[in-house]
Image (cartoon, rainbow, N blue to C red):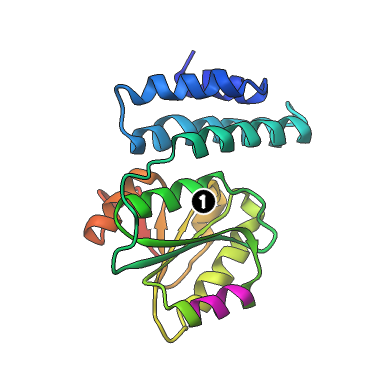
Amino acid sequence: MHESTQLSDLFLQGQEEEALKYVQDFLESHSYEQLYSELLTPAMYRIGELWEQNEISVAEEHLATAVCDFVLSATELRNKAGNGPKKAMVFGPEGEEHYIGLKMVAALFREEGYEVRYMGPNLPLDSALELAGEWQPDVVALSGALAHRLPALKTYAEAFAHTGSNPAVLIGGRAVTLSSFADLHVKGAVVVRELGALREWIRTGKGPNDDTLSTG
């Protein structure tokens, strides 16, 4: 059985301590980036797929998310204060309730020295724009998990593209990996399909290849 599948089963069973030990054992020979991209993200994608296919209940999906949140919070890398000169604002659009991916994105930005404002999911556009106007972030990172969030992601990204501070706008999450995303054109936004590409963008301003990161 694949490691991420084993972990997702622990999440679904509500096994907090077992899941935490599983992750800590993984970290003995892997980086935090590998934890996020190779273990936690695939585990939560699998849970999302099981929920969409009605193989698990809403309650089971919520339980799995809560256990993953516990594990993520217990292991989040904090060896850098994240109070550098650059600023990143991380959130999900209104109606988006998934937040695990957002927390991983925020952690990566902090690790790379950014000051981060993690706003969580379900942030109304007016509030997001107001905060951006006051705080003047260098980067605005948006995430959506389900296909029907794609129009909202486009609306938000285009709104931020016209703000005075002109932040870089990143769009990620499971939604951008779905086939329906191909028809969505968001001018000026950077599409990040996995966390390795995000780290590469943070460090160099570009992705490792065109398949993992692209501009709209």
The furthest residue to the top? 1
In this picture, residue 51 sits left or right of residue 41: right
Report x, y in % for residue 192. 40, 53
Q: Is residue 2 above or below residue 179?
A: above
In this picture, residue 68 sits left or right of residue 215: right
Q: For this rendering, which residue is in front, 94 or 127?
A: 127
Report x, y in % for residue 131. 54, 76
The furthest residue to the bottom? 164
The residue labelled by disc 1 is: 102
The furthest residue to the left? 204
Residue at 51 percent across and 51 percent down: it is 102
Give yes or no for residue 132 being in the magenta stretch: yes
Residue at 45 percent across and 24 percent down: it is 23
| Amino acid type assigned to the residue bearing label 1 in the image | Leu
Q: Which type of secondary structure does the marked residue at label 1 adopt?
A: helix
Report the magenta stretch's main SS.
helix
Q: For this rendering, which residue is in front, 98 or 56?
A: 98
In this picture, residue 129 sits left or right of residue 77: right
Quarter of the image that includes the C terminus:
bottom left
**Mark 1: few/some/many CA within 10 Å (<14, 14-19, 20+):** many
Report x, y in % for residue 148. 66, 55
Q: For this rendering, which residue is in front, 141 or 182?
A: 141
Report x, y in % for residue 128. 57, 73
Q: Which residues are magenta?
A: 127-133
Give yes or no for residue 71 being in the magenta stretch: no
Q: Is residue 82 above or below residue 160?
A: above
Residue at 61 percent across and 25 percent down: it is 11
Q: Is residue 188 above or below residue 122?
A: below
Q: Is residue 7 above or below residue 208?
A: above
